[in-house]
Amino acid sequence: MKEELNYTIDQVAQIMGFSKGSVECFMISGILKSQEVSPGDYRVKQSDLDEFKDRVNKN
């Protein structure tokens, strides 16, 4: 079974073309799901990023 990729906030910002601050706002508001892997260090699963991309592209 293949392990799912996880992305840092910086990586998500680069992939999506948003600022790091915008990505953090999406995470805080719950629009983009993320997991805290250590205090202040978050990761976004590939499946959550794909879901976020779908939501963004619909608007």
Image (cartoon, helix red, strand yellow):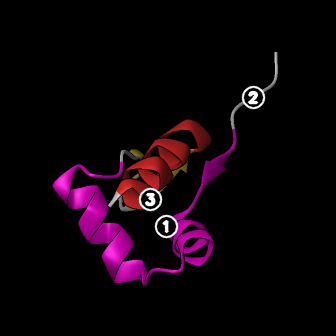
Q: Which residue is mark 2?
A: 3
Quadrant of the drawing holding the C terminus: bottom left
Seen at 30% across and 57% down, the residue is: 27
Magenta-colored stretch includes residue 10:
yes
Q: Amino acid at mark 2?
A: Glu
Observer-nearest of 21 and 57 = 57
Q: Above or below — where is 55 with respect to 10?
A: above
Quadrant of the drawing holding the N terminus: top right
Residue at the far left in the pictured view: 29
Magenta stretch bounds: 5-32
Seen at 43% across and 84% down, the residue is: 19
Q: Which residue is mark 3?
A: 57
Q: Residues within 10 Å of mark 3 (few under 14, many from 20)?
A: few
Place of residue 34 in the rendered image (x, y in percent of width and height, measured from the top left): 40, 47
Helix, strand or loop status at disc 1: helix
Label ID, residue 43: none
Q: Above or below — where is 38 with respect to 24?
A: above
Depth check, mark 1 against mark 3: the one in front is 3
Place of residue 56 in the rendered image (x, y in percent of width and height, measured from the top left): 39, 59
Could you say which quadrant of the image residue 22 lies in?
Answer: bottom left
Q: Amino acid at mark 3?
A: Asn
Magenta-colored stretch includes residue 12:
yes
